[in-house]
Amino acid sequence: MTEQSAAAAARATVYGYPRQGRNRELKKAVEGYWQGRVDAAALRETAAGLRRTNWRQLADAGIHEVPSGDFSYYDHVLDTSVMVGAVPERHRATVDADETQGYFAMARGTQDVAPLEMTKWFDTNYHYLVPELGPDTVFAADSTKQVGELTEALALGLTARPVLLGPVTYLLLAKPAPGVAADFEPLTLLDRLLPVYAEILADLRAAGADWVQLDEPALVQDRTPAELTAAARAYRELGGAADRPKLLVASYFGRLGDALPVLAKAPVDGLALDFTESGAANLESLAAVGGLPGKRLVAGVVDGRNIWINDFEKSLATLGTLLGLAGQVDVSASCSLLHVPLDATAEGDIDPEIVRWLAFARQKSAEIATLARALTEGTAAITAELAANRAALASRAGSALTRDPAVRARAAAVTDADGRRSQPYAVRTAAQRAHLRLPLLPTTTIGSFPQTTELRTARADLRKGRIDTAGYEERIREEIREVVTFQEKTGIDVLVHGEPERNDMVQYFAEQLTGYVATRHGWVQSYGTRYVRPPVLVGDISRPEPMTVRWTSYAQSLTDRPVKGMLTGPVTMLAWSFVRDDQPLGDTARQVALALRDEVGDLEAAGTSVIQVDEPALRETLPLRAADHAGYLAWATESFRLTTAGVRPETQIHTHMCYAEFGDIVQAIDDLDADVISLEAARSHMQVAGELAAHGYPREAGPGVYDIHSPRVPSAEEATALLRKGLEAIPAERLWVNPDCGLKTRGWPETRASLENLVTAARAIRTGLAAGGS
């Protein structure tokens, strides 16, 4: 690579950074605030300290331009709603009385006021709060957060670039507010919103911003001509404003397609594009439009979503091509580093050979800086780094840890018949009803019960040797007895054992399967203060021994009612892990499915009559472009059927999905051939029930009537109203009654009250149906 001139020196930058802190200090501070142990001033100080630490880490790694404004107490889309004044009317009084309490009320709700709907951020496991808009929405600029955080960064002597969610994506993510016609299009508010953005941009310019980043990831999805025209209008207006900073429009998670020429022609000063494998087509498209002469291009050549080290030579080849396509080429990750853990060097329990292959946020920042240095000074300046990179890549490619011939032979031998139940649904459902003898509108829960402080303490005590295995297992048995007794007393029809032994619905299984590696400190934000540690999928997958049979069988021994066996499905096992990038995802999914198939068989053999295989990530992992849907859904649904198809007709297979838009995958849900599906529906007001009905979904379904991501306790009357709405779409003989999701994050008092109300609602509806009413 040739050396660039000093005037064109490549800058290293990132779009965003993990928020939580090395020891999840943000989680502890926010939850302390909710519990009244931390006041608002202390919460703000903790947040400011985390931002300072993040910026200094980035600067020390060689990042020339740090992001500001990407930090959030809960969610950056919610922050955007606050920034533009789009506060739902039902939360207005709380926000006006106390901004911090009002902010969290919008996210979590209160006993009297429902929160904003929550769903997945594109095809990631991050969740955002859905903006609620209507024709009467009045926007108003509030740049306090953005200006304040920019000022903090500048005070440290850093070059900072504020990051805003772009106006087009913000409106495309929004939904009609309650009471607004369902066909209302939030994008029609664009002309009302743009002056607010222009005001905020002017405030940032006045505060010292040279550049501002506007994120438009929605433009990597299929967009209509009208939506592309709206994007062109938005950036024509914002780019034409006199009093503005330089504008960098960023997209990520894939290829821009028809939106790229729109943005390339817009009067903005630069684009940030994804040039990893998912966005590889952007290079060809950029060349086709003649590049960005005289403009800045931020090249996302380091994968911001996965944890494998970068291939420096491959990235430098891409960057070399891009040098001729823009006035200035800078280096970044493909998206915000929010989606990866903080620091791989903290993982002392992982085989050092594997650690060589990993790059978390801090390592990715260093990779970006190294690539920017090579782009400016030539590859001779990074000779040592290139040699180490080649060696690490070769180590992984040749490692015996990544290949198991027996697993590969078994996967290759799978036939179509292995993925088909022995009897059609009509035959199975009759056999299941005769075997299970459940009432109309059967009640159940999704699986997990509250993970109490005592449970977490017991798990930590076992890990640190303060108690032995026998003492720990007795604690688990006590919890299972309590959970089963409560469910029987409450009147729940299909029970669960509560999953007290499980740390996480993916990690628990990953720790018992070959081919996975679990991290100790690899926390990633899922939503709010909910952090997960996605395991790393290093090699081929198999199941050495049963994983769940023991505890499920113990729970069943305590009751005559059916107890569900609970498993996490193959797509979710991939989606909520860091997957290997050296083979197709479908091949990995088949390996996981075969391992889970063995577990399903053992559960059935042990007497488990109801087995739930959760696939909450089925919709989340759907590719962002419609042209890519069929290929994904083919292997995704095949892997579920391969997991579940080996059971007898009378064994009832459940699945569960939550917090996503299901309307465009109802056929795939049908193709799973599960006997019962439970889905999130409380915050979306039973929308999914209507979508199932419109499709003609023929099986049983449980659209949730209890929003478990809020601390509020829904009344029996609320649950009854939701059930009646569900009955408008799903016949009573096919309708189940359940919460939206597992109860792991809830406390016991609210769980008891909410489930009691849920059962009361189901009984009231049953009574009404028996009497010939509703």
Image (cartoon, helix red, strand yellow):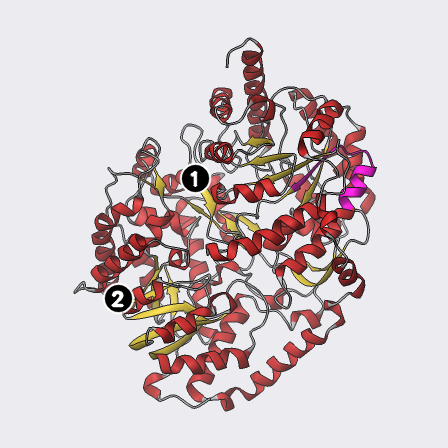
Mark 1 neighbour class, 10 Å CA radius: few under 14, some 14 to 19, many 20 or more: many
Left or right, 179 with respect to 704, comes to left
- Residue 678, given in percent of the width and then of the height, sits at 58, 35
Task: Decide which of 486, 233 is in the foreground and name it.
Answer: 233
Q: Looking at the image, which residue is at 50% across and 69% down?
A: 276
User: Which span of residues is magenta-colored?
Assistant: 599-613
Left or right, 550 with respect to 211, comes to right
Is any atom of residue 13 visible in this view?
no
**Is residue 442 magenta-colored?**
no
Left or right, 116 with respect to 658, comes to left
Query: What mark, if any, has residue 759 been given in the picture?
Result: none
Q: Looking at the image, which residue is at 26% across and 40% down?
A: 137
Separation of residues labelled 2 and 1 (CA atoms)? 33 Å
**Is residue 602 magenta-colored?**
yes
**Three-letter code for the amino acid on which mark 2 is drawn:** Ala
Reading the chain from its start, which is encountered first: label 2 or label 1? 1
Query: What mark, if any, has residue 117 been given in the picture?
Result: 1
Q: Are marks 2 and 1 in contact (CB under 8 Å)?
A: no
Is any atom of residue 676 visible in this view?
yes
**Disc 2 target residue:** 266
Left or right, 367 with respect to 184, comes to right
Q: Is residue 210 above or below residue 636?
A: below
- Residue 221, given in percent of the width and then of the height, sits at 42, 56
